Image (cartoon, rainbow, N blue to C red):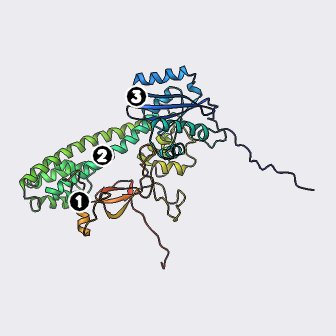
Amino acid sequence: MSDPAVDPTPARAPAPADFAPFTHFAGFDWAGDHHDLVVVDRAGAVVLRLRFDDTAEGWQCLAERLAERGITPGLTAVAVETSAGSAVQRLLDLGLAVYPVNPMAARRYRERKAPSGAKDDQLDAWSLADALRLDGVRPDGLGWRRLVPDDPLVQELRLLCRDEVQLIAQRTALVNQLRAALREYYPVALEAFDDWTRPHGWHLVLSFPTPAALAAAGRRRWERFLKGHGLNRPETRDHRLACFARAGQFCSSNPAVTAAKSRLSVALATMLLALQGQLDEYRRRIGELFDRHPDHDLFGSLPGAGGKLAPRLLAELGADRTRFDTAQALQCFAGTAPVESFPPNGYGLYEVTGNVWEWTTDWYRDHGAEPPSSPCCARERSYDPQHPNLRIPRRVIKGGSHLCAPNYCHRYRPAARMPQAVDTSTSHIGFRCIVRPSGQ
């Protein structure tokens, strides 16, 4: 007896819960002051081409033109190269189903329509619309993921967490400038304090702007300063007092340098204190919103989450709990990922891109610049020509980091390179370790 025939056609997967039989598909190419929209029907025929200004009148014109062509927003899906921003929010407000697409994927779809690579906003919008029709919306669950709007609390929490990261980066930039200025005329201040991301170093500059002012203050004022800023531990107090005592021994002998750089240092320290005050307010508001969310106990109990990572995890996950397939995928999105979180490349290397920017031993020079004649010259020529007063050498970092979001960064590749001051220390810059088997 022969075996019963087996149907080689695989079983069709059930339609996803958010699948809708859309009647129209749109591609949205956004810009700063205007946008382009192309709408196609189910057969791929173009039913609307529109360029409109990013104004109240422009968006009203879009709504009217959709109505004129019989395009129902609730039955229309739109593809756009970002998942956030005012334009995306206005598309949602119109009732359209938004499907974010990675810019690199959008580029491939555009090349499918125009192999020459010619840039044209209407072409970009049309290629997105047709790609959404053919590949994006599918009943088998293999299409693109639809953007699910979050409630206002989660939206505010997410924006605050992302903006906080950007403000911290600005603080790092100001600290680097302050350290460079102090190195010019006030090296004892750098010797006394290691961590210049904390306010006590800034207060030192404001209280004693020059080495002469520090030396003239005397030991009693030094001790009051340290005690007033909670720096009275014996193991560090004695070291700092010794540094203060020799403030005038190794400093700039040029009064013009001291006058100019002390003024710059006071300005930077003032800005850092103001910025830190705003960061404290951000942290307070983030904690307040996190405590109000019904899932704060769950995220707060995650191992290793802590007071900063837990709100960021909650904010990025939002209301769409199907956005990440695994808990590890969520953690990788919100921060650095453990090694081997993603498949290796063709050389067997893991996380070559997108985890942290990686330090290299090369001193930075612009593409096309003449190679230096010796290693010492390479270091000297790595300084930033846009900021000649910042005499901090820069090395090459490569590969992009977890902060490089697809909607604004195109550096997810090993060849991506950029300069970075050597005294920078942030969570998204690291280095690669190579483990060799014993005997090799």
Q: Which residue is mark 2?
A: 170
Q: CA distance from mark 3 to mark 2?
A: 29 Å
Residue kind at label 2, given as amino acid type: Gln
Q: Earlier in the sequence, mark 3 or mark 2?
A: 3
Q: How many marks?
A: 3
- 288 sits left or right of 437 in the view: left
Q: Which residue is mark 1?
A: 236
**Badge 1 element:** helix
The answer to whether residue 29 is seen in the rendering is: yes
Residue kind at label 3, given as amino acid type: Asp
Q: Earlier in the sequence, mark 2 or mark 1?
A: 2
Q: CA distance from mark 2 to mark 1?
A: 28 Å
The answer to whether residue 206 is seen in the rendering is: no
Q: Residues within 10 Å of mark 2 (few under 14, many from 20)?
A: some
**Of labels 3 and 2, the one closer to you:** 3
Q: Which residue is mark 3?
A: 54
In front: 115, or 193? Answer: 115
**Of labels 2 and 1, the one closer to you:** 2
Q: Earlier in the sequence, mark 1 or mark 3?
A: 3
Residue 378 point in image, percent of width and height: 26, 65
In front: 193, or 414? Answer: 414
